[in-house]
Amino acid sequence: MLLKLLKYELKSTGSRFLVAFAVYIGIFAVLFGFFRDNVILTTMFTVSGMIALIVITMLTMFQRYNTNLYGNEGYLMFTLPVKGRELLLSKLISTLIWMIALSIVGIASMVCFAFAYGHINSFNLDVIAQALLNNWSYFLLLAFEYFLSTLLTIISIYTSISVSKLPIWRKFGVLMGLVTYFVISFLQGVPIFIMGYFKLINVTMHIEGLSFIKDTYVSSVIWIQTGFIIIFCVGLFFGISYLFEKRTSLK
Amino acid sequence: MDNLVEISNLTKKYEGKIALDDISFSISQGRIVGLLGPNGAGKTTLIKILSGVLCDFQGSVIIDGQKPGPYTKSIVAYLPDKTYLSSWMKVSDTIDLFSDFYEDFDKFKAKELMKRLKIELDQKVTKLSKGTYEKVQLVIVMSRRAKLYVLDEPLGGVDPASRDVILDTILKNYNENSTVLLSTQLISDVERIFDSVIILKDGQVFINDDVDRVREKSGKSIDEFFREVFKCY
């Protein structure tokens, strides 16, 4: 059932994302193909284009969850013979897929940008490649943490929307949704803050260059951070599943 | 006759207001039951609970021996009084979706019914008129071989000529062992198909009886009886 739900999720959002990505990549290719000398134009487009893609992704994620589950479409979704957690998983996976696609487009355009203006050349490309190869397990861990952080962002927004729809808030649903989001965000920072305060770990982050990252944003910190992210994700996942199965109240 | 639906001490409150007040009744298999009552009597709330879109209630609801959940959703065919199809869908997508999720869905029958009602499969649902949209929803719901059909105002937005088509669709397509629970305000159009009626009033069961017995006792049709009882509303 999860795969079937996922199929319809991707069908419903696919056209919007594919068009948005295609337009961005198309304009990017034209600008860097024919107007590479105009640095202001290409820089402005790269930045504003990425912001536009991020906004489209976030809006689509919010709108799809809100209208598909809590609008009229909810009368179809909540009467399908599936478990609440399958419904939630299908939404999470589809949004994650688009978020990862967005990240790939973003990283690819930054790399192209750096190549086009000589920030990366054959000399420092070797240095970067060597640094990545020598520290592959560390960068894999960073990528894993990024993946989980993205998941936590999505699930935090979903939790806020689901909480805001509880009938007990009456007219204050939107406010309670915002409060929920800020509370979750605050709680996410608490464990690292406490450990940093008691100097159990060094939480100072410097990202000026690759060599500095590993020394200051050490693996132990990432593992602790990742552990807390997993706990938050699992807790919020079962929280939303509970709301779906026990507290659904469509108007 | 076995009971398909058993409801005991069901209470549902909305923001302090009681929509269903400690109601208890059962519905047998193979019946067409009219769910009647004035606006705000609790009909839609009861239907939402049976279909699983309202979960926070007090009391017990048992459908085919199980509490509302994935199993009951697999045997209940629900037609809400709202348009609930996704805007990106074509009519053919709605058939595919029901076919994917409901084992009891008859795809061939759905296509036949759409053809008979002159509904094109490649039309987007957002381009359909209100009446046609409702027919699409009714067709996909009635193309299931469900144990319980829960239909909330299926005649709501359609013209009088189409009402006969819809009633005909319901009568010809439901399984004789299935139960139909149909809520409507157009009682005179539908009462001929009812085996029994449940009339709700102020969140409580006012009448739960066979239609013939109600007619016999009151000496009136169900429509006339309803108008007389609720004339002050």
Image: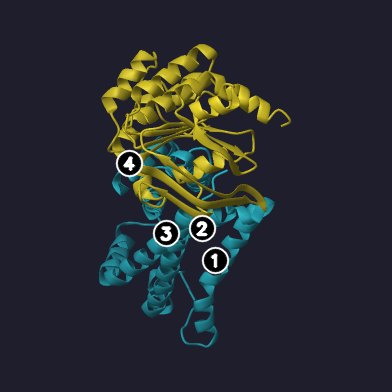
**Residue A226 percent location from the top left of the image:** 40, 71
For residue A148, which quarter of the picture? Answer: bottom left
Q: Camera-side residue: A137 or B206?
A: B206
Q: Dot 4: what SS? A: helix
Vertical comparison of B15 with B88: above or below: below
Looking at the picture, the colour scheme in use is by chain
The picture's colour for chain A is cyan
For residue A219, which quarter of the picture? Answer: bottom left
- Which subunit holds the residue at mark 4? A
Q: Are marks 1 and 4 on the same chain?
A: yes
Mark nearer the viewer, 2 or 3 = 2
Report which residue position mark 3 lands on: A151
Report which residue position mark 2 lands on: A159
**Residue A167 percent location from the top left of the image:** 61, 52
Dot 3, how many residues are within 10 Å of its Cα: few (below 14), some (14-19), or many (20+)? Answer: some
Three-letter amino acid code at the position of disc 4: Lys
- Which subunit holds the residue at mark 3? A
